[in-house]
Amino acid sequence: MSSNYQETHNQILKLAELYKEVKSVITLCEKYDPQQKLALGPLNELRNALDHIFRAFDPVEIDEKQFGKVANHLKRAAFDAYDALAIVLFAEISEIESNYSAKVISKICPKYYEEYHSEITKLNKILAEDKSNRPELKEKYFDKVNESIEKAIHIYDDIKSKIPAFERYSSEDKKRETQHNYHQYIGWIIALMIAFFSFI
């Protein structure tokens, strides 16, 4: 086995490992975005990566420069999937928040305003990094984004699991408010009647 062949083989193995990581991110995105509304970006990057793979295997010789371009497109595909996943998660979380009062959310899920909001803000800052520089960023950045996305998924799953409790408490709270208003109205009516008869 020639040294050139071995080197090419090693580069392909590295790309295969990177692809596995990227695929796991895209699969996760598909899970939380089943309608694939935001899948175009990652799929386009995968198409570009495939294009460079075929360019690498020239009939005359292997163009190893293409492998670096493949890696960059794979990383961009992962970051685009992270972006899409974050957009979906934030939209879902925001919709849940808009459906219930702060009182209900705080009662059932105290962590939402105490911890979760700051985590979401932190993730937004990380994803705001200039996309054009992302492929050149160190692996630590990739790990940081992955960690933040995992936290966002945890937040979403936790809040979504509490929707039945939100519904129950919200319904009970409305009943309590209705009863309170009813008793208040009765009190006003009694007070008016007492005032009226006191002047007769």
Image (cartoon, rainbow, N blue to C red):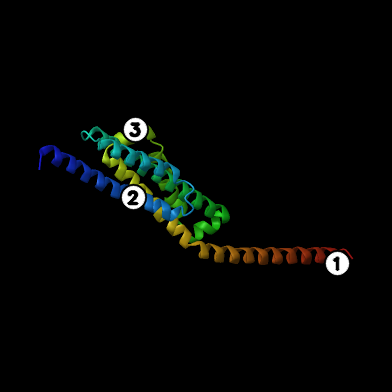
Looking at marks 2 and 3 on the same chain, the residue that comes earlier in the sequence is marked by: 2
Taking the spot 47% from the left edge, 59% from the top edge, the residue there is 160
Specify the amino acid type for callout 1. Phe
Residue annotated with mark 1 = 197
Q: Position of residue 185 (x, y in %)?
A: 74, 63
Q: Is residue 109 visible in the rendered structure shown here?
A: no
Identify the element where label 3 is drawn: helix
Taking the spot 38% from the left edge, 35% from the top edge, the residue there is 131
Specify the amino acid type for callout 2. Lys
Looking at marks 2 and 1 on the same chain, the residue that comes earlier in the sequence is marked by: 2
Residue annotated with mark 2 = 23
Q: Is residue 123 above or below residue 65?
A: below
Residue annotated with mark 3 = 133
Q: Tell me how far mark 2 sits from mark 1, CA to CA.
A: 80 Å
Q: Is residue 140 visible in the rendered structure shown here?
A: yes
In depth, the one of 183 and 11 nearer the eye is 11
Q: Position of residue 102 (x, y in %)?
A: 54, 54
Query: Quadrant of the image for the N terminus?
Result: top left
